[in-house]
Amino acid sequence: MRGTFKLSEFRPGQQQVIESIVAHRDTVAIMPTGAGKSLCYQLPALHLPGTTVVVSPLISLMKDQTDKLNELGVWARQINSTVPERDVAATLEAVRAGSIDFVFATPERLENADLVAALKETRIDLFVVDEAHCLSEWGHDFRPAFLNLGAAVKALGSPPVLALTATATERVLEDVVRLLGLRNPAVLNLGVFRPNLHYRVHHTATDTAKEQRLVRLLRDTTGNGLVYVATVKHCESVSRTLEAEGLTVASYHGGLAARTRRETQDRFMAGELKAIVATNAFGMGIDKADIRFVVHYDMPGSLEAYYQESGRAGRDGDPAECILLYRVEDRRTHQFFMGGKYPGADDIVAVRDALLALGAADAPATLPEVQAQATGVAKTKIRSVLAMMKELGLVRELRGSRFRLVGDTVDGSRIEEVALLYTSRKEADRDKLQRMASYAQSADCRWKLLLEYFNETDGVEPCGTCDNCLQPAEQRLAPPVDRDRPAFLPRQ
């Protein structure tokens, strides 16, 4: 720890997590942003004899961690869509030779047979899933590859698993343990409260008012930070508005070229930008401790997402502002997304029919074969339907993302069962959105609302630093007092 990482002592909770890993125990660590989650796998991995696989949902996270480890003289490589194939091939060769300490990969790459085959030729001492809440929140949505991570762990000989996240409700924790196949895991929860984060909500009546408020906030707030938006369209328009006002900003979203994203991230890390305007494609695991503000231009879809994203501020422990610009109409964006988020009955029937047409009851069908057969259904939705059918015991998933039907058909009642599961998930999403809106409209202490949501209710006191604590609702709503008149007038 002193020699490689130049650290003299552990932060709270780090030592317990590391000791659990060194004891070869499956571990779930729920640690607030800034608590030093990365060291929890980086330090023990250097004491263990083999290679550590780190699954990261975002390329920006991977690049950041890989760069920092290489600077420390630790052999780390990343495999994702931005890495040229010749570099991927060189990395796989080094993996087979056992000369790499860390391999960072996206969940989608863990579905690649070549990568899994290379990893099987070396000793895997630890399998890390960073931002593990994504298993539950994204697995049945736009990143279904998360649902295959449990199969990847088995394929690699079931090494010890470390699941890391800043938040986990009971339901998310259950999903993580089940989907990764964790065996009697140690669950270490350090809580979510961070007293240096000061939460505020500004209500805006129109988009123009929201833009004007954002400009003022960026001009009045010292340091640099993040502005989160819900869509690529907003990302571009808000960036243009801020640039027109003379502010040094850049946009970051999944539609930009990899080189552009990388250059923007480097400029931000170097402190050259006042702010990055980003979709949620940016931020997880970014090791920039002095982010002084996180503004949500659009309301997130859940308090989990809001805490995760706002928590990227103030990792150095100094005060930081977490501001939500709230407009009632913001809910419509999320309601629109929900409408097309989950597969419908027609999609489920199409996947069932594709499996039957491919003879999957007799011989397993590959994922690309099912996707080619089920025309008219989005590829991510096909993967999601297969995962749900697997959960209900309707299909078995074999190595290499191959699927075999259990039995020679799937009748209407079982199709309805799959559809009902998606309906329950949609209702859960609506409830999360309602809780997020309630937070924005509440007069209670912001931290109290967050802690209650994450079931941390013991000894909760008002934080004293959020907008509602500093100026309670009765003060904000009271009519202005005319100092030249008495406080009250007697009855006539």
Image: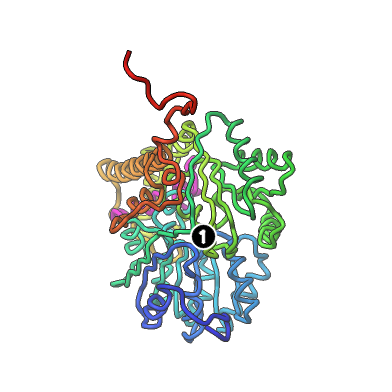
Residue 440, how many percent across, how many down? 43, 40
Name the residue beneath numbered marker 1: 57
Residue 291, how many percent across, how many down? 59, 58
Residue at far top of view: 492
Q: Secondary structure at mark 1?
A: loop
Of residue 209 and residue 415, the one placed in the foreground of this image is 209
Q: Residue at x 41, y 78 (%)?
A: 15
Of residue 363 and residue 379, the one placed in the foreground of this image is 379
Q: Amino acid at mark 1?
A: Pro
80 lies left or right of 349? right
379 lies left or right of 29? right
415 lies left or right of 142? left
Instruction: Answer above or below: position of 159 versus 457.
Output: below
Residue 391 forms part of the magenta stretch: yes
The image quadrant of residue 490 is: top left
State whether the magenta stretch is mostly helix, strand or loop: helix
Of residue 236 and residue 255, the one placed in the foreground of this image is 236
Q: Which residues are magenta?
A: 369-394
Rendered image coloring scheme: rainbow
